[in-house]
């Protein structure tokens, strides 16, 4: 964690994910090498370079902790039936312990509908509607790795959640909705904002814990943040120079926030590490 002073003079805590991700990977490697080698299958049907880079990073990270990773590239021209059949086949394969469908998908293909073909016991990224339903009901399920990463970061930095006001900006089934349930389970008082929320800043500025997960660069500025709030930036928006920037205006928000995650280097490393830990644990389910 790095510290620096904001313009208000207080010490800003930069909540990096590097150390936490390393600890999760070490734990995962111990689990992965203790018995049957876990195997993760990633189904891809896109030519989107950012997505392909992410898949390559998963495969590399998997190799580093003793998990086999099969990338099943169907190409951007794959039709929904082919994708669904591939997911069903891999779900039925006893040699595959974890299974995920990478987005974006070709036109006409619905990620939510196709994810229903993933066996919930292998659904390591929490995409199957059954997994999401179990999560909402407080039953055992693999949560989406990004949503789980936010909670893991908050725990790592010992951010108290019980009784605190938490605001999640974004209502996707990948982050916003599952994260709201995870925060509720930790006794936070949760508000979910979205594109139809009136006067966004009036709502977010009441948050003690603020999570931005919209995919709109710089959406959250200083006016959206309460003094001393903990701000988690889930956004990964490409920049013209080939880099990434978050949903939070880091420099502006640094002046008021008490703690803030960077992009890159915050939620991202933890997300990948948790995806692999879910795979190792799926391999050991009875």
Image: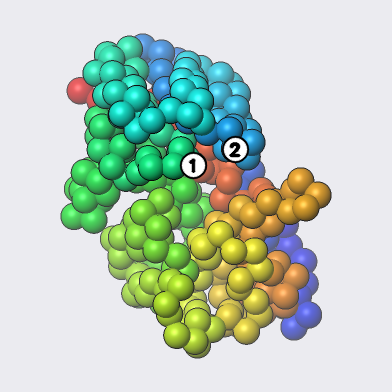
Query: In the image, what residue occupies the spot 56% across and 50% down?
Result: 267
- Is any part of residue 76 visible from this angle? yes
Q: Nearer the viewer, residue 175 or 108?
A: 108
Question: Residue 164 in the image: x percent, y percent?
Answer: 40, 75
Give the answer, above or below, for where 138 lies relative to 164. Answer: above
48 with respect to 239 (left or right): left
Query: In the image, what residue occupies the spot 27% across and 13% down?
Result: 94
Please identify the quarter of the rendering in which residue 36 is found.
Answer: top left
For disc 2, the marked residue is 48
Question: Residue 197 in the image: x percent, y percent?
Answer: 43, 80
Tell me how far mark 2 sits from mark 1, CA to CA: 7 Å
- Is any part of residue 206 visible from this angle? no
User: Is the Cβ of the residue at disc 2 closer than 8 Å to that at disc 1?
Assistant: yes
Which quadrant does the N terminus fall into?
bottom right
Q: Quick one: SS at disc 2?
A: loop
Query: In the image, what residue occupies the spot 50% across and 70% down?
Result: 210
For disc 1, the marked residue is 104
Give the answer, above or below, for where 148 lies relative to 251. Answer: above
262 with respect to 184 (left or right): right
252 with respect to 87 (left or right): right
Question: Residue 50 in the image: x percent, y percent?
Answer: 63, 40
Q: Nearer the viewer, residue 67 or 78?
A: 78
Question: Residue 108 in the image: x percent, y percent?
Answer: 38, 42
Query: In the image, what residue occupies the spot 37% across and 40% down?
Result: 109
Q: Quick one: SS at disc 1?
A: loop
Which quadrant does the C terminus fall into?
top left
């Amino acid at each position: 964690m790095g510290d620096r002073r904001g313009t208000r003079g207080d010490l800003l805590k930069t909540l990096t994910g590097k150390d936490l991700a390393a600890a999760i990977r070490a734990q995962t490697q111990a689990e992965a090498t203790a018995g049957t080698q876990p195997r993760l299958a990633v189904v891809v049907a896109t030519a989107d370079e950012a997505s392909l880079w992410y898949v390559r990073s998963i495969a590399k990270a998997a190799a580093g902790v003793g998990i086999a990773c099969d990338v099943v590239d169907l190409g951007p021209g794959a039709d929904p039936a082919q994708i669904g059949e591939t997911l069903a086949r891999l779900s039925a394969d006893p040699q595959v312990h974890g299974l995920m469908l990478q987005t974006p998908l070709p036109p006409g293909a619905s990620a939510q509908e196709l994810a229903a073909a993933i066996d919930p016991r292998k659904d390591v990224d929490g995409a199957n509607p059954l997994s999401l339903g179990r999560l909402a009901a407080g039953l055992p399920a693999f949560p989406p790795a990004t949503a789980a990463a936010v909670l893991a970061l908050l725990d790592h930095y010992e951010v108290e959640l019980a009784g605190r006001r938490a605001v999640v900006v974004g209502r996707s089934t990948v982050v916003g909705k599952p994260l709201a349930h995870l925060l509720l389970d930790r006794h936070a008082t949760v508000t979910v904002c979205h594109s139809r929320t009136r006067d966004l800043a009036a709502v977010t500025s009441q948050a003690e814990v603020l999570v931005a997960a919209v995919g709109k660069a710089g959406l959250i500025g200083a006016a959206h943040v309460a003094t001393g709030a903990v701000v988690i930036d889930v956004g990964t928006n490409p920049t013209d120079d080939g880099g990434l920037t978050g949903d939070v205006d880091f420099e502006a928000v640094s002046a008021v926030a008490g703690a803030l995650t960077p992009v890159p280097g915050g939620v991202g490393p933890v997300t990948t590490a948790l995806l692999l830990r879910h795979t190792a644990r799926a391999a050991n389910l009875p």
